[in-house]
Image: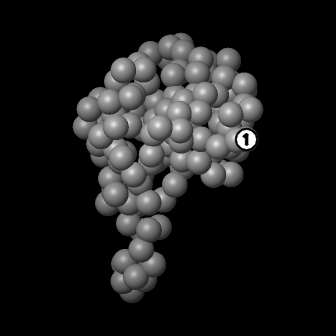
Amino acid sequence: MAEKESLRILLIGGGGREHALAWKLSQSTRVETIFCAPGNGATGNVRKAINVPSLSPDQPADLLVFAKKSNINLVVVGPEVPLVAGIVDVFESDGIQCFGPRAVAARMEGSKTFAKDFSE
């Protein structure tokens, strides 16, 4: 991504965390549009944000198709479940930058048993 390139962001999730992320991201002059998948009533009221209720965080193939079609250049993943399932790996393998841990790192947060075993 070029340093001054405007950002077309795909924000994955539909909870309060995603509203806070959309609100803060929308304050950047570099952000052109934030597509919230699926979004919620609050994200729909954020300047620069557009809800995409037809998209689900647990459908990475559909999210990837949308990202390509919409010229997304940054994906931000809020929920833990898609992170653990490897959604960042999917986007990065297709050359789309993601903010979030890859599946192997997300296991630490997603599985308390794994985290406990890891730390012993």
The image position of residue 110, as x and y in percent, is 44, 68
> In the depicted view, which residue is nearer to us: 87 or 35?
35
Which part of the image, by quadrant, shows the N terminus? Answer: top left
Q: Is residue 59 above or below residue 103?
A: above
The image position of residue 77, as x and y in percent, is 49, 45
Q: At x 43% / y 24%, what residue is drawn?
A: 72
Q: At x 47% / y 38%, what residue is drawn?
A: 54
Instruction: Determine the secondary structure under disc 1.
Output: loop
Task: Indicate the amino acid at tag 1.
Answer: Ala
Tell me: 24 left or right of 9: right
Quadrant housing residue 55: top left
Tell me: 103 left or right of 33: left
> In the depicted view, which residue is nearer to us: 36 or 112?
36
Q: Which residue is mark 1?
A: 42
The image position of residue 107, as x and y in percent, is 38, 66
> In the depicted view, which residue is nearer to us: 80 or 28?
80
Q: Is residue 50 visible?
A: yes
How is this picture coloured? one colour
